[in-house]
Amino acid sequence: MNAGFRRLTDYLGSSYWFVPTVMAIAAVLLAGGMVALDSKVGSAWMDGYVWLYASRPDGARQVLSSVGGSMITVAGTVFSVTIAAVVYASGQYGPRLLTNFMRDRGNQVTLGTFIATFLYCLLVLRTIHSADESGGYGFVPNLALLVGVLLALCSIAVLIYFIHHVPSKIHINSVIEDVGDRLLRGIDDRFPRFVGSSPDDHATTATNVPDTFRDDANASVGKQRRIVAAKDTGYIQFLDDEAVLRLASKHDLVLRLQYQPGDFVHVGRALVEVWPPEQCDDACANDLRDAFAVGSRRSALQDLRFLVDELVEIAARALSPGVNDPFTAVTCLDWLSAAMSDLAGRSLPSHLRVDDAGALRVIAHPTTFASLMDRSFGALAQYCAADMVASLRYLNALGEVSLDCDEPDRLTTIRLYADRLEELAGDALKGFNLTRVRTRTGELRTALDQPDYKRRLRDGTAWLAGTA
């Protein structure tokens, strides 16, 4: 249930119709309420104000007709401008960024404001009638008319905001900042929190892994499990980790997750493997399936790799021969270095998850610093190696990440990608450009080999200033 609700919430947040629809419904309710209030209060109270006077039926109709007609015209223009901006951004930065523009609240509220104002004026307009039309009794909802004029003024303010918002939103630095901020927030939210809690003694917990899930399990032992198959085809968008752990504890099970958020699953594939199989009935299997939300596209709800891939895609497009924009790639590297620096200082959870009693319940996919480094810097090495500016910032970003590293194995990973970049640059660059990259790689490697590498990187003015 929670997985389906979270998927629906994410879908509505990234849809272009939900907020305008809510605002349109609010406009209908406001129009009905204001007309009802006008029918009780009347307009005699307006005579006490010099700057406010009651309108006649013809004048009220003209005002509301002008406001309503102009609002629906502007709404069409706003929609056209937004679609043009979305098409440009998706073609320039990558189709996966389309959702980022669709979920932009400023565009949704702008369209909703004009549509809501139009509906409000239309509904109030039909309630106006003169004495001749109604057999001696005329009605002009002057209070509702005043609200309509105020809505028109608000719409003008929103239009001014929209004119500024669209070009600033499609600016490449704003696009990268949006993705980078979401990535940093995702790291902060998801680490070290994960399914269940990490075991205090990983080695002891590892001995409790059922034989059927061990790599050396024979054929007969390997069959001692129940397969919970997927019922849909698509990308896993959300996994209700609390529900999975709760089901495992309730039925005294050990679960091994075959897929994680962001993976593509086909109907009939094994989502979860369950041990012991006899304790997992059909109802339990259905509950486990419902813990997974599957959709047609990847989502950033729980998939940090998706946000990393977006930054990598922007940088790769920028470094392509047809675009040749290394400074956009430099911006992506800066945000990736910030994310990996944040991750480098965190204790990543074990893939063995235990419940409150300390019993092994879930075997998840391992999340390691090396895997995310490979997803980010590993994927960009081949593109950055062909450009001196991007290569130098690539090495600078590795140096920034190392400033937050205290574990030797993570420093070894950073050194590995510096070596790989140098190797690739040897095939793609030559002359002065290649010499610059090799010199910078040597400086980074020399600093990382020293016990006080953080001080050496911070104090090295040549390192800090010699950037792209």
Image (cartoon, rainbow, N blue to C red):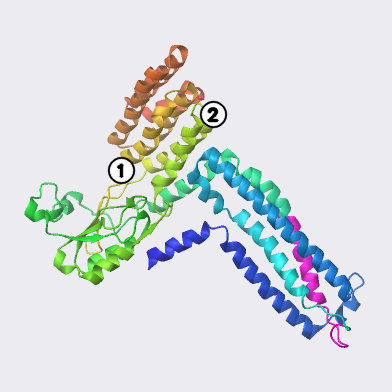
Label disc, if present, on residue 379 of the rendered structure: none
User: Residue drawn at (72%, 70%), measured in percent from left and top?
Assistant: 120
Please give the range of residues in magenta: 133-158
Q: Secondary structure at mark 2?
A: loop
Label 1 Cα neighbours within 10 Å, binned few <14 / some 14-19 / many ≥20: some
Q: Amino acid at mark 1?
A: Thr
Residue furthest top in the image: 431
Name the image quarter holding residue 391: top left
Label 2 Cα neighbours within 10 Å, binned few <14 / some 14-19 / many ≥20: some
Q: Nearer the viewer, residue 15 or 430?
A: 15
Q: Mark 1 = which residue? A: 368
Q: Secondary structure at mark 1?
A: loop
Question: Is residue 403 in view?
Answer: no
Q: Position of residue 291 (x, y in %)?
A: 33, 63
Q: CA distance from mark 1 to mark 2?
A: 31 Å
Query: With 288 as the anchor, is 69 left or right in this view?
Result: right
Q: Mark 2 = which residue? A: 325
Give the number of the mark in front: 1 or 2: 2
Using the image, determine if residue 17 lies above or below residue 444. below
Residue furthest right in the image: 50
User: Residue drawn at (65%, 47%), measured in percent from left and top?
Assistant: 166
Q: Position of residue 144 (x, y in %)?
A: 77, 74
Query: With 207 as the anchor, is 419 left or right in this view?
Result: right
Quadrant where the N terminus sits is bottom left
Using the image, determine if residue 176 lies above or below residue 106. above
**Of marks 1 and 2, which one's residue comes earlier in the chain?**
2
Q: Amino acid at mark 2?
A: Asp
Residue 139 is a magenta residue: yes
What number of labels is visible? 2
Name the image quarter holding residue 157: bottom right
Q: Position of residue 128 (x, y in %)?
A: 81, 77
User: Residue drawn at (31%, 46%), measured in percent from left and top?
Assistant: 367
